[in-house]
Image (cartoon, coloured by chain):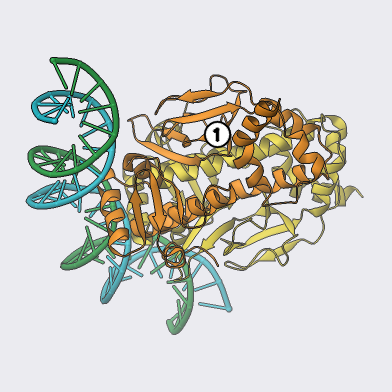
Chain colours: A orange, B yellow, C green, D cyan
Amino acid sequence: MGLAVRKSSALLAPFTAHLSNYAALGEEDLNGLGWEPADLQLHAIREPLLSGPEEVRLVTSGWAGVSRVLADGRRQILHVAIAGDIVNAPPIAEGEVSALTTARTIDAGPLLEWLRSQAANSGVVRAWTLAQAEHQRLLYEQIARLGAMTAYERAASFITELLARHQRAGLSDGRRMPWPATQEVIADVLGLSMVHVNRVLQQLRRDGMIETRSGMLIVCDPERLAAAGFAPA
Amino acid sequence: MGLAVRKSSALLAPFTAHLSNYAALGEEDLNGLGWEPADLQLHAIREPLLSGPEEVRLVTSGWAGVSRVLADGRRQILHVAIAGDIVNAPPIAEGEVSALTTARTIDAGPLLEWLRSQAANSGVVRAWTLAQAEHQRLLYEQIARLGAMTAYERAASFITELLARHQRAGLSDGRRMPWPATQEVIADVLGLSMVHVNRVLQQLRRDGMIETRSGMLIVCDPERLAAAGFAPA
DNA sequence: CGTATAATTGAGGGATATCAAAACCGGTGG
DNA sequence: CCACCGGTTTTGATATCCCTCAATTATACG
């Protein structure tokens, strides 16, 4: 059992780390989460993540995305899910959930089941509720980005947000984070063309804001990047 | 009591009509809603709608808006609330809830209180849950509009959405609806300049899609407008 | 009527898209 | 070890959608 538990913890670590930002998780909470991850899957890029409308999955590595594809092929990525995030079928017609990079997921059904069985005032449940509110905040933020910001500001804002999220999930020290996506994905997130994303990222590099190396992105000056992306203090 | 009840019903009608789209409301549900509207307020345009973070209000006429205002004054309206919608403080920094037109609201605290006291499997509660999901769908849709559509498509999409929402609230026959907003408001919703909104609306009129007269908007050909805005069938 | 607000029009510029090609890069087989 | 290969990044040139600025007309309201 020792090995199994250790493996399970590793897969769940981003999820529990994320939740622990919103409320203190009690001893019993953490024990409850020592559940055996089921149905570990490896998804190729662009592969649909969910096979049924009821399925829920927890991302353990890579990026998953909720997107809307218009009739003529234009794709808008509505939300990016990173390790520790749970994805489900969005309530939107013509919406789809797919792997934005090669990604790993596990079945989150039992996890949600267990969450629903917990007392409403327990630490995990309060944390989960706040995490939901945070998810809604991300959607609002995405609207503000696309509607009111320039390309440069959108990129700065998005990178700042992802950095904070990775840090909350215990996957960043506040300066470095995994960066598995192609510029085409970033383009579909930010509502820009691939070519323009390339130019904007170059500009951010020239401005000494970021560096990218071997699947990682380094934010040289988090403060300045946040300011460029209108991140509230 | 007769008068009071009649008055209350009128104010609550859009709300109950909206909910009844998602689940059949039982006899007891409707009785429960026969509650006396409190604290009816008239808001001038641009006036903040909420005085505290805990306040929740039900819009009974006009438009309310959740917006994010950037440091340099740019405003993005994240969500438009019409009659029958409940608004609360968004979980977003630098977010604000204000009247987009002159608007009337009542205190929705007692209403939500009452909702929470109802059985989880009752009609109203199921309807309310689905209404929440629908709200999230609207946010997704707004992201797709701003990120992937042209100005013309954004306008078509937004008008189509508002028409459907007014119809669900019992405030439209499927072709006509209240249209209280200035073009500046539309601009801040669609992420466009006021001037360009004007030109796009003119184009929609020239194309025989819409007409605007005395505070009402008439959609001449709902099908064609929906298609222009990529509304799923 | 006169005044303020909103809608409309025109001219010109800028941000971003599109198109096309070239350089790069990690893997794979000869 | 090298040549190739598909996918990704980068670059250049041109087009276009939409913005900004500024002025004019329409509309509502006292």
What is the three-letter code of the residue carrying label 1? Val
Percent x, y for residue B103? 64, 60
B89, A20: nearer the viewer: A20
In this rendering, the count of numbered labels is: 1
A44 relative to B169, above or below: above
Determine the residue positioned at 43% across, 53% down: A159
Number of other residues with Cα within 10 Å of mark 1, as a class: few under 14, some 14 to 19, many 20 or more: many
Left or right side of B114 for A138: left
Determine the residue positioned at 34% across, 44% down: A214
B205, A216: nearer the viewer: A216
Question: What's the chain of the residue with tag 1?
Answer: A
Determine the residue positioned at 50% across, 35% down: A61
Left or right side of A79 for A150: left
Identify the residue position indicated by label 1 in the image.
A59
Residue A154 shows up from this direction: no
Percent x, y for residue D22? 26, 76
Element type at marker 1?
Answer: strand
Percent x, y for residue A43? 46, 25
Determine the residue positioned at 47% across, 41% down: A78
Quadrant of the image occupied by residue A32? top right
